[in-house]
Amino acid sequence: MAKVELKNLTKTYPDGVTAVKDVTITIEDKEFVVLVGPSGCGKTTTLRMVAGLEEITSGEILIDRKLVNNVHPKDRDIAMVFQNYALYPHMTVYKNMAFGLMLRGVSKQEIDKRVREAGEILGLTDYLNAKPRVLSGGQRQRVAVGRAIVRNPKVFLFDEPLSNLDAKMRVQMRAEISKLHHQLKATIIYVTHDQIEAMTMGDRIVVMNNGTVQQVGTPLELYHKPANKFVAGFIGSPPMNMIEGIIVVKNEKMYFTDTHNIEIIVPENLEEPIKTYINKKIVLGIRPEDFIINQNQVLQKGLSISADVEVVEPMGSEMNLYLNTGKNIITVKLKLTNEPPIGKPFIVNIDNGKIHFFDPISEQTII
Ligand code: ATP
């Protein structure tokens, strides 16, 4: 298998759109790295440059320390799995998997061995003689993966492979691809716009926006220590609440206030970096799951928010509440047994150790 290095990778299309700007990432041997970001952020373009399907405007791509900028796609020892499966409808599952190897002149015996092995790994043994049209979406996607596996490539590239599957099948295939990664011990670069897919599958995640890398880290690093407001808002569901306000000092204590009815005490460990924001604008970030039930419904200074209940979404084990403070709508996720009445005030507490602050201009996390 192989290490993949992207160095200052940039892509400007002929129409002048710069889709990828100065991207530098190292994907270690056998690592599963997910590129995630909203539509149009440049993740597919990045993947296609690695595959050799898109010309590089500037920068370098190295596979196993070898510069591959000018190496033909078929000589890069890479296999790519696409969103639309791209199976040949008139060929059987067996032939679909075997075809690429036949073109490469691999012996019939070796092809048979590899196709049967891949069929075994992917649970397709009983379908080897079937045509794609009789298969479910998930099975077709497995054939597409099988076609990549039989090539025994250095690197696997996946471009939104689960987008065409229904929600249940997506969850199942997610687990299957993770399992496959452990079985094959392969280097994988996986593109998705779905942050849950990224969080559940990646060893590390690269969050992209507007063609640039926002942060690279393990799923939990991105969740607990987002580098900026974009990453904080993109990772996690429902998204982090962002509340604009200022920092004030009362009785020698620092508080965040939205200048309406929210007043939250700044935790001690953040007092030092927050000092420079006294009487200045700042953004407070708090995840829906970082609120605490206020059992007695009594306001606690610096810790509670009181707001009207607008919408209640019972999720089974938890409830999502949408609360209107008069200035902000905040999303709160709580393990409540009874639904609070709509339109009535409801008091929640903030888990103060879990709040984040962002600079309103640079949008960087203040630490
Ligand atoms: P999606 O999830 O929608 O595929 P993405 O993050 O993969 O998005 P890209 O497909 O890499 O993003 O596109 C990045 C930017 O480059 C977009 O603004 C897109 O419109 C533009 N782009 C992509 N392909 C071309 C092309 N062939 N010619 C011109 N511009 C392109």
Image (cartoon, rainbow, N blue to C red):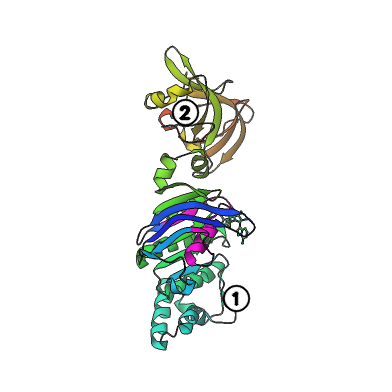
Amino acid type assigned to the residue bearing label 2 in the image:
Ile
Tag 2 residue = 350
Residue 231: give x, y in percent of width and height.
49, 43
Mark found first going from the N terminus, 1 or 2: 1
The front one of 28 and 286 is: 28
284 to the left or right of 16: left
Screen quadrant of the N terminus: bottom left
Whether residue 64 is in magenta: the answer is no
Q: Residues within 10 Å of mark 1 (few under 14, many from 20)?
A: few
Which residue does the image show at 48% across and 78% down from the upper left? 97
Q: Amino acid at mark 1?
A: Arg
Which residue is located at x 39 percent, y 69 percent?
A: 154
The x and y percentages for residue 324 are 61, 29
Give the mark count: 2
Instruction: Please report the bounds of the magenta region as a residue range.
Output: 33-58
Q: Residues within 10 Å of mark 2 (few under 14, many from 20)?
A: many
Q: Is residue 349 above or below residue 131?
A: above
Residue underneath mark 1 = 133
| Residue 199 visible here | no
Residue 73 to residue 330: above or below: below
Q: Which quarter of the rendering shows the C terminus?
A: top left
Dividing the image into four equal quarters, which quarter contains ligand 1? bottom right
Percent across and percent down for residue 222 are 43, 44
Q: CA distance from mark 1 to mark 2?
A: 53 Å
